[in-house]
Amino acid sequence: MVDTVEISRVSLRDTLSVDVSVWMHHPDDWDFRPTLHYAGSTFIIQCANSGNELATVELDDEQHEALHRDGVAELRVKFQVHGMHGRLNKIHPIIADGKAKKLATANWKTTQQVEFRG
């Protein structure tokens, strides 16, 4: 199950692009089904299963126009799990190739329809 969802950045590329960090309870959790909504000037990410609001962000005029023009938004999701992901304070380089170890992350990118409300 999803613990928290944080919208880290909203930008304009070809369409409206929303960078999202999704924190899961367990590494084997696969239950993230977002639906996108837009009401007034607020962009909303909801859970398709429960209908709960997961995250919201206010859009500026340029982002508002792009969203109405395209009717879709691109979600760029970074999945993270509490206890597995966090800050790597001490980097241990791999002597053989000189590169530092990194924490494993799962990324996901999708383009979804946006439902417009009142």
Image (tube, rainbow, N blue to C red):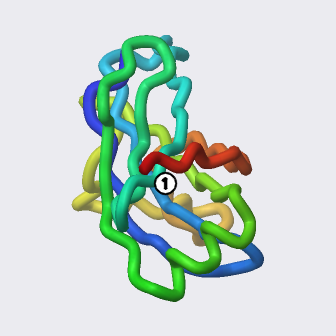
Q: Residue at x 31, y 68 (%)?
A: 58
| Mark 1, residue position | 102
In the picture provided, is 16 more to the left or to the right than 85?
right
Question: Quick check: 17 above or below 110?
Answer: below
**Residue displayed at 59% across by 71% down:** 98
Going by the numbered disc 1, the residue's amino acid type is Lys
Under circle 1, the secondary element is loop
Where is residue 41, by image quadrant?
bottom left
Q: Nearer the viewer, residue 24 or 27?
A: 24
Q: Badge 1: how crowded within 10 Å, few (<14), some, or many (20+)?
A: few
Residue 97 vertical placement versus 78 (above, below): below
Q: Going by the image, does 104 lie left or right of 110?
A: left
| Quarter the N terminus occupies | top left
- Residue 33 position within the rendered picture, expressed as x and y whole percent measured from the top left: 55, 24
Locate residue 15, reporting x and y percent. Answer: 70, 71
Front residue of this view, candidates 33 and 44: 44
Picture coordinates of residue 16 (x, y %)?
61, 70
Q: How many marks?
A: 1
Residue 82, relative to residue 11: is it above or below? above
What residue is rendered at 23% in x and 60% in y?
A: 89
With 24 as the anchor, is 117 left or right in this view?
Answer: right
Q: At x 58% / y 40%, what residue is drawn?
A: 106
The picture places residue 78, in percent across and down from the top left corner, at: 50, 47
Name the residue at the front extreme. 118
